[in-house]
Image (cartoon, rainbow, N blue to C red):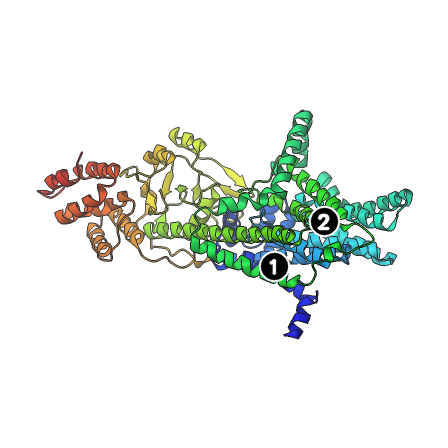
Amino acid sequence: MQKARVFFSNRTFLEYLLLAFISALAYLLFVTKFGYYYDDWYLMYAAGAKGASVFLDIFSVDRPMRTFVMSPAYLLFGGDPVLFNLSAWGFRVLSAWFFYWGLSLLWAHKQKVAWLTALLYLIYPGFLSQLNGIDYQSQMVSLAVMMLSLVLTIYAYQTQKMPLRLVLFVLLALLTTFYLGLVEYFVGMEVFKAAVLVALVSRAETNWSPRSRKSFLWVMYSGLTSLPFLVWRLFFFESERGATDVNVKLGDVLSNPFVYALQWMINLLKDLVDVVLLAWVVPLQRLSVGLTIQQWLLGGVVAGLILVLVWQMLKGEENSLNLRTSFDWRMEAIWLGGVMLVFGLLPVILVGRYVDFKSFSRYALAPSIGAVLLWQAGLSYISVTWLRKFVLAFLIGISLLTHYANGLVKARETELTRNFWWQVGWRAPGIDPRATLITRYAVAAEEDYFTWGPANLIYYPDSNHEQYTEPVLYAMILNEDTIEKIIAREPQEYSNRRSIRTYPNPRNILILTQPTPDSCVQVIDLARLELSSFEDARVREVAPYSEADQISLTDEFRTPPFIPFGVEPQHGWCYYYQKASFSRQAGEWDEVLRLGEEAISLGYFAKDQIEWMPFLQAYALSGNSTRLDEIASFMTSDLPALKQACLTLTEMMLPPGIDAEVQDSICVD
């Protein structure tokens, strides 16, 4: 036991190991349940269709350096989101290790401060895209290299050997070009490194003149390491993407500089509040909706365990914050934190972006370095020990609960997405090439590739063209613009997004919708229009244009690939509904009857009453009045669905006597 205590108090390997362990509990509890999110769909489809070299075409429009990350990563991991997430976590931990190393060099007598600051940075709650390990692989690599460049910058200052400084200069130039080539809006770190050098010079020089001269020389040393990237980016590289094109943004600003300057100032103040304060409030508040008491208890246990580990790690160092040094580390932390906050946010704000914890939390990542430095300095000014511990526990606890809730939400998103597309696979053995899909379900399709990506991975994983990436199935986003195009019967469009070419056709749509999380996936068919009472108004507008005959009835059913769709869900009500809907479309009414009897015998029932329609029609055609009455009793809770059933059945050629039964049990006022 005594040896364990001695080892626990030594700040060596254990400090780094504990950072990794804490972050694993924060980010990896649900890692096996994570799938594809957002841009992952087109990235992994393109790589599967064309191989790892496709990333050169994809990223050539704005960040070609990312090819050097994504191509090797795809060769190593394939399309496995679990491996990508583990790799992204590893690079995030590596960045925290380098950050801790750099702070330890900067504040050699403040190891507790350095370690806690690195911990707060590692579990900062305002960055929520850590679990998007495929698309954010490059950001995590950039972050690790960026922090390594900070360590080497401090070493360059501390060494007295000019040859070593020269070697470090060349190495820093290469590393800086690489990490900024991956994520150019991390450029604020270059100002931060210069500020660190000024702080180091200020300690050594008390007179204003030598301090100014040496500070200038060291700032120049640091600045020249970023010069290769800046020259390439500003004068040689031409971005094809407006959001990252410097010339386009500069032209916009010059057209109305005063308006832009005012807007920048407002956005900067707002983002400062978001990054420093609201990051510990807003994300958890948004993510916690729908969490059960049991889930909260588990999250609390995990957070409690980590807090115990942190307290044990820091045991016996209550007075270290007040340890006297030859410089005021707290003022340095405030100075450096302020610099990183402002210059970490400015590159984002200047191109019209902002921190948003729902969609743009990535812009809080670099400024988080400044935020945790300010928090650590602020904690040191709290003289009451219990209060200081309480605030620190609050920061750590909220951070952990935020990432825990984020993991649950992401796992749930993956489950909903996989379930949706498995149902599509059960329903449609094939979909005609060139069909344009429109989807609506719990995970909003914010981009067209959220739909055509998974659809093509199931039905057409190979590109439709030899020279470039072209999906076979296309998609459109369900919004007002799409609705107008569909109703106006506008012609086929052409889209080239990151070298991936699609041709969505508003005249050739197929709608796949899941009105509620309890509903099954429903194929909208203009020839047999059945709409759930819970259906979105936008779907209702374009429903009369959805052509279900684009589902091929003669193809073999396809099994969605394990990556990324996971194992096949349990065959519950929705399985029987999908198979019955397919059999109805194929005219196989006996099979619909068989499926209906099997589903009812197993105790499965529709939660969305419109889903009784295939079975209701089959029982009516077979003359089974008992089942008609039974289903009608279920549907009385949903009068709009019952009215649709009445309309459908009265238009069918039914056996003698069933017409009257339909009128009595289905067509009720």
Q: Is residue 668 left or right of residue 546?
A: left
Which residue is nearer to you in this view: 642 or 478?
642
Marker count (numbered): 2
Quarter containing the C terminus: top left
Depicted 302 relative to depicted 496: above or below:
below
Q: Where residue 283 sits: x, y (%)?
A: 54, 45
Where is residue 182 drawn, in percent x and y? 65, 48
Q: Can residue 274 be seen?
A: yes
Residue at coordinates 58% horizontally, 53% vertically from top-left?
Answer: 53
* Badge nearest the viewer, 1 or 2: 1
Placement of 403 over or under 14, stated as above or below: above
Where does residue 251 sit, x and y in percent of width and height?
67, 29
Quarter of the rendering containing residue 504? top left
- Judged from the image, the secondary structure of the residue bearing numbered disc 1 is helix
Nearest the camera: 234 or 329? Answer: 329
Q: Judge the density around disc 2: few (<14), some (14-19), many (≥20) Cα neighbours within 10 Å.
A: many
Where residue 440 appears, x then y in whole percent? 40, 42
Disc 2 target residue: 177
Element under label 2? helix
Q: Is residue 194 left or right of residue 43?
A: right
Dot 1 or dot 2, earlier in sequence: 1
Separation of residues labelled 1 and 2 (CA atoms): 22 Å
* Residue type beneath disc 2: Thr
What residue is pinned by disc 1? 90
> Identity of the amino acid at label 1?
Gly
* Residue in the image at 82% along x and 45% along y: 220
The label number, if any, that marks residue 219 in the structure image: none
Q: Quadrant of residue 570?
A: bottom left
Which class describes the residues within 10 Å of circle 1: few (<14), some (14-19), or many (20+)? some
